[in-house]
Image (cartoon, rainbow, N blue to C red):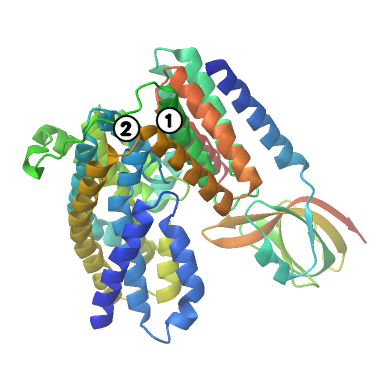
C-alpha cells in the first residue's frame, strides 16, 4: 500500500502539472465576464489599448472593452495597439486582476 | 445595543454550525453575508453585521477541533490536531483532547487583550521589517524539519512532494484550493489508514471533570509564550496562517501531544481574533471574515473597535462553555457508533463537500493529497513534513515580493 500510495501521488502531481500547463484558456471579451472566473484561471483577452497607467511593478493596460490587464515591467508601451493576451486571473487581499502571461500585439 | 446583542447570539449559533460541520469554513459564510449586505443593511446596522461575523469566527475557532478530533475531518485551522487528537481518542481521551484545545482558546483571550495595544500602537511601524525576515524563518524551519528526521530520505521525498503539490494547487483554477489539499493530506488519509486497521471499535470515552484535566504550569507558560511569539505575526502577514504558526512554535519548544493541542487552541483563536484588530491598525485583511468586516464597516472607528473587542471576549467565554457541552455530547455518542461506518460516512461527506466547493480538479488534488498523506503515515515520517504544502508556496510568495 505504501508503494501504491506513492505511485498514485506521483501520477496525481504529474496530471495536475499537465492540467496547469495545457488547459486551454477561456476567451473573455468584457469586464462582466470576470465574475464567472475562478482564481488562477487562464483567459484569452483581445482588444485595443486605450489607456496605460503605471503601478508599482506593472504597467496597467486599459482595453476598449473595459478589461484591465497587468503587464509585469519590463513591458513595452502598447497604447493604441491591438493586443491579444493569455492572462491569469489572480487575487491578492481579495482584489482580483488579470496578469499577462503571454502577449501578442501588432501596430 | 439590542441589535448588537442579537447579532452576538445569532453569531454563536451560526459559528456552532460552521465549527461542528466539517468543511464549512467561516469565510464561506462571510462571503455569502457580504453578498447580502445591501439588503441586510435595511434591517440592521453595519456594526451589528460586523459583530455577527466576528462572533461566528471566534465561535468557529473554539469548536472546529471537535470534528477534527472525533471524526478526523479537519478544516484549514484545525488540521494539525488530527494526529494527537486521534491518538487520544483511541485511548478514550477524545473529550480531554478537545478540552485542552478549548483551554488554549480561552488562554488566547488573555493574550489577545495583551496584544491589542501592540497591534494598535507598534505594529504599523514594524510590519515591513517582519515581512522581510519571514521567508528566511520559513526556510530555516523547512531545513530543520527535514534534517531532524531519522528517516531522512522518506522525509525529504515527502517534504518535496508536499511542497510541490502545494505550489501546483495554488496555481490551479480551483475555488477553495486549501479544502482538498488539507483534507487529503491530514484528514481522508488518516481515515483510510484507520479503516485498514482491524480494531474499529472506539473505546468508551472518559468524561473527566474539568478540574482533573490539567497541564503543568511550566507547560502552560511555555506554550503560551511560544504562541505569543508566533501567532500574532501570522495574524497580519499574508501567505502564512495558523498551521505555519503551530509548526514554528512546535519547533521552538518541544511539545507533547497534550501541550500541542493546547498550543493549537491558543494559536487558532489568536490568529483569527487579531486579524480583525489588524484591519483597524494597518488596514490589512488577513482572512475572508476580516475582508467582510472591512467591507461592511468601510472605516473602523474606535467605538467600532471597542465593540469588536467586547464581542471577541464575550463570544470567546460563551464558546468555551458551548465547546465543553458539545464535546461531552460527542464523547458520549462516539462509542455507540460503529467507527468503521462513521469513518466511511465522514469520508463520503468530505468527498461531497470537496465536490460541491471545488471542482473535478479539486477532486484530483484531494486524491493526490490523500495518497501522499497515506505514504507519509506508512513511511513513519512525521506528518508535520506535509506542512511543506503550505511552507514552500509561502517561501516562494515572500521571496517573489
Is disc 2 surrounded by few (<14), some (14 to 19) or many (20+) residues within 10 Å? Answer: many
Residue at horizontal 19 percent and vertical 52 percent from the top:
B325
Q: Could you tell which of marks 2 and 1 lies nearer the N-terminus? A: 2
What residue is shown with label 1? B190
Q: Report whether B160 appears left or right of A54.
A: left
Front residue of B255/B210: it is: B210
Is disc 1 surrounded by few (<14), some (14 to 19) or many (20+) residues within 10 Å? Answer: many
What residue is shown with label 2? B86
Query: What residue occupies the far bottom of the structure in this picture?
Result: B42
Q: Does label 1 lie on the same chain as label 2?
A: yes
Q: Please, which chain is the residue tagged with disc 2 on?
A: B
Front residue of B328/B228: it is: B328
Q: Is residue B128 above or below residue A55?
A: above
Q: Report whether A86 appears left or right of A56.
A: right
Q: Is residue A60 above or below residue B166?
A: below
Residue at horizontal 33 percent and vertical 55 percent from the top:
B60
Residue at horizontal 43 percent and vertical 87 percent from the top:
B42
Q: Secondary structure at mark 1?
A: helix
Disc 2 to disc 1: CB gap under 8 Å? yes
Image quadrant containing the N terminus of chain B: bottom left
Amino acid at each position: 500500500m505504501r508503494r501504491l500510495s506513492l505511485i498514485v501521488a506521483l501520477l496525481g502531481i504529474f496530471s495536475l502539472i499537465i492540467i496547469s500547463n495545457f488547459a486551454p484558456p477561456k476567451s473573455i471579451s468584457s469586464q462582466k465576464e470576470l465574475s464567472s472566473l475562478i482564481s488562477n484561471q487562464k483567459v484569452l483577452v483581445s482588444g485595443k489599448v486605450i489607456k496605460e497607467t503605471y503601478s508599482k511593478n506593472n504597467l496597467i493596460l486599459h482595453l476598449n472593452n473595459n478589461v484591465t490587464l497587468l503587464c509585469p515591467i519590463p513591458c513595452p508601451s502598447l497604447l493604441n495597439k491591438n493586443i491579444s493576451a493569455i492572462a491569469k486571473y489572480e487575487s491578492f487581499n481579495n482584489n482580483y486582476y488579470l496578469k499577462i502571461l503571454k502577449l501578442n500585439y501588432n501596430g | 445595543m439590542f441589535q448588537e446583542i442579537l447579532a452576538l447570539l445569532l453569531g454563536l449559533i451560526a459559528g456552532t454550525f460552521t465549527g461542528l460541520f466539517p468543511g464549512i469554513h467561516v469565510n464561506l459564510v462571510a462571503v455569502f453575508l457580504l453578498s447580502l449586505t445591501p439588503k441586510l443593511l435595511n434591517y440592521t446596522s453595519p456594526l451589528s453585521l460586523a459583530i455577527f461575523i466576528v462572533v461566528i469566527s471566534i465561535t468557529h475557532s473554539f469548536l472546529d477541533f471537535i470534528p477534527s478530533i472525533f471524526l478526523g475531518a479537519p478544516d484549514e485551522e484545525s488540521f494539525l490536531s488530527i494526529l494527537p487528537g486521534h491518538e487520544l481518542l483511541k485511548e478514550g481521551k477524545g473529550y480531554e483532547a478537545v478540552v485542552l484545545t478549548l483551554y488554549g482558546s480561552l488562554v488566547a483571550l488573555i493574550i489577545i487583550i495583551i496584544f491589542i495595544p501592540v497591534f494598535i500602537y507598534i505594529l504599523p511601524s514594524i510590519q515591513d521589517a517582519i515581512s522581510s525576515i519571514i521567508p528566511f524563518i520559513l526556510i530555516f524551519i523547512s531545513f530543520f524539519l527535514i534534517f531532524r528526521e531519522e528517516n531522512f530520505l522518506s522525509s525529504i521525498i515527502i517534504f518535496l512532494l508536499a511542497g510541490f503539490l502545494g505550489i501546483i494547487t495554488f496555481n490551479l483554477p480551483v475555488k477553495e484550493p486549501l479544502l482538498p489539499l488539507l483534507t487529503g493530506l491530514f484528514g481522508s488519509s488518516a481515515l483510510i489508514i484507520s479503516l485498514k486497521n482491524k480494531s474499529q471499535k472506539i473505546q468508551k470515552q472518559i468524561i473527566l471533570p474539568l478540574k482533573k484535566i490539567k497541564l503543568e504550569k511550566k507547560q502552560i507558560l511555555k506554550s503560551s509564550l511560544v504562541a505569543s511569539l508566533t501567532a500574532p505575526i501570522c495574524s497580519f502577514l499574508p501567505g502564512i496562517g495558523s498551521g505555519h504558526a503551530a509548526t514554528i512554535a512546535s519547533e521552538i519548544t518541544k511539545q507533547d501531544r497534550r501541550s500541542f493541542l493546547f498550543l493549537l487552541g491558543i494559536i487558532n483563536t489568536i490568529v483569527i481574533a487579531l486579524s480583525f484588530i489588524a484591519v483597524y491598525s494597518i488596514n490589512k485583511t488577513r482572512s475572508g471574515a476580516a475582508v467582510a468586516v472591512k467591507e461592511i464597516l468601510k472605516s473602523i472607528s474606535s467605538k467600532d473597535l471597542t465593540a469588536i473587542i467586547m464581542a471577541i471576549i464575550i463570544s470567546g467565554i460563551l464558546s468555551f462553555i458551548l465547546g465543553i457541552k458539545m464535546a461531552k455530547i460527542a464523547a458520549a455518542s462516539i462509542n455507540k457508533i460503529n467507527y468503521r461506518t462513521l469513518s466511511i460516512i465522514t469520508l463520503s461527506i468530505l468527498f461531497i463537500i470537496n465536490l460541491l466547493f471545488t471542482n473535478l480538479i479539486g477532486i484530483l488534488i484531494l486524491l493526490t493529497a490523500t495518497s501522499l498523506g497515506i505514504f507519509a503515515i506508512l513511511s513513519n515520517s512525521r506528518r508535520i513534513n506535509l506542512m511543506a504544502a503550505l511552507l514552500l508556496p509561502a517561501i516562494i510568495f515572500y521571496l517573489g515580493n
